[in-house]
Amino acid sequence: MAKAYLIGAGPGDPGLITVKGQRLMQECEVVIYDYLASKTFLALCRPDAEIIYVGKKGGDHTLPQDQINDLIVAKVREGKNVARLKGGDPYIFGRGAEEAEELLEAGLEFEVVPGVTSAVAGAAYAGIPLTHRKYASSVSLITGHEDPTKPDSAHNWPALATAASTLCFYMGVKNLPYISAKLIENGMRADMPAALVRWGTTSEHQSWVSTIGEIPAMAEREGVKAPSMLVVGEVVQLHDTLNWFEKLPLHGKGVVVTRAREQASGLKDTLEGLGAACYEFPTITIVPLEDYAPVRAAIDRLQDYDWAIFTSVNGVRHFWNQLELVGKDARAFGAMQIAAIGPATAEALLERGIRPDFIPPKYVAESVVEGLLERGIAGKRVLIPRARVAREVLPEELAKVAAQVDVLPVYETQLTQEDGAEIIDLLEKGRLHYLTFSSSSTVENFFALVPADTLRPYVGQGLKICCIGPVTAGTLKDYGFTPDIMPEDYTIPALVEALVKG
């Protein structure tokens, strides 16, 4: 029987969704989500899922709650499992209970999957434990949306002002002067520590510390906007000591990741783990070939080759797909020698039962050829499974030493249909600090989408260009740019390390 799942997505960091919530996102036929639920979660959805946005941002108005309720009911009645994804926790100021009541009234089934609420997570990322043996033994979660013109407040202000609880006001920025005044008026001392946490746990996370008496003026002075959480209590004293998130080396730095979407997640996850705000701009897409007959033919005559040289993880992956389709495995290589260009390619081969005979110390064609010559490749038969379009330096250099080289396309790269407008908008807003390029093709395709003249005014004015190695740097030079950052080892981990060093 179809069912609705009211899923708490957590406060913004995609890693804080529960395992159960993630599994249901992958299974449900319909996903209905809010603005505050990170769009990163949409990548979890099954390919045929119907994805419906019902949140709001600025002038982009949400559906009224009653229409959201009707939508959930209608989709479940169609016999579809519905993931209702909500920021934070469904029941903590999330109106999840209203949605559950509507489903019950309609005779439909539902489950609630709790999420990490923003008060707990945002404060923790800001170094504020909501309870502490020395400072507070209880917590009050309070809406900051209450209309200050109402004759009777729903809040017991004397109790809130005089209790030893930590007070967490959700969405309290708009009413901050009112909240401050009511607490002081009802007995709280004006120098009680208070903090604001904006976009808690996300790459845009910021926090400010003051006192309950001074925090309205501070918020106005600093231009603090929603969505922000107000935390009031003695525990705020621990902010500077325990504030781990804002001390990450790339916190607040915007980084553009231009790798193919299939490859970007590892780099993106690493950078985000260091605090960066990552913007995926996959300038290339890895796609299979239309005809794999030549690849299967090469597999049938693998015994004719002395060497196989894999230049990328994609080459390994797509070659192995065909190897397995014809019922073969690593044993098909027999006594051949195998070279892997780079540690990631070597790891992909190891996962498939092949320990490479040669991994060059530097991952450019010229260095590869030098190492292969030392291993007697001159005059040998060589197979290079790779992209349809790639640099010809390696096969050309091997041909000079009488190696018989067969270049075997096993996949191709295509320019994505991404629009450069988002990157241009981020540049104009000063949100980007690093632009990363991991190959020549990412450079070429980036500038096909973002004109070089558009980028030029920002380089050196807060924006640095990072590239993986000299070949990519050479392609950048064709567009009139010199990289600001380039690692000594031409690998993604080395690129990240160099970027952190700045």
Image (cartoon, rainbow, N blue to C red):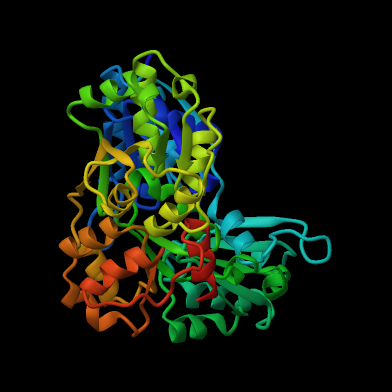
Residue 363 falls in which quadrant of the image?
A: bottom left
Q: Is residue 238 left or right of residue 435?
A: right
Name the residue at 43% across, 53% down: 368
- Using the image as rendered, state which of residue 171 and residue 444 is in the foreground: 444
Q: What is the tally of numbered marks visible in this picture?
A: 0
Q: Position of residue 99 (x, y in %)?
A: 39, 34
Name the residue at 39% across, 13% down: 327
Q: Is residue 243 visible?
A: yes
Residue 353 falls in which quadrant of the image?
A: top right
Q: Is residue 475 left or right of residue 251?
A: left
Quadrant of the frame with the N terminus: top left
- Using the image as rendered, state which of residue 301 and residue 340 is in the foreground: 301
Q: Is residue 9 visible?
A: no
- Using the image as rendered, state which of residue 213 and residue 29 is in the foreground: 29
Name the residue at 36% across, 25% down: 304
Q: Position of residue 174 (x, y in %)?
A: 42, 71
Q: Is residue 199 left or right of residue 247?
A: left
Up/down of 434 relative to 373, above or below? below
Q: Position of residue 473 (x, y in %)?
A: 33, 69
Q: Is residue 133 left or right of residue 96?
A: right
Name the residue at 25% across, 19% down: 78
Residue placed furthest toward the right = 134
Q: Position of residue 158 (x, y in %)?
A: 65, 67
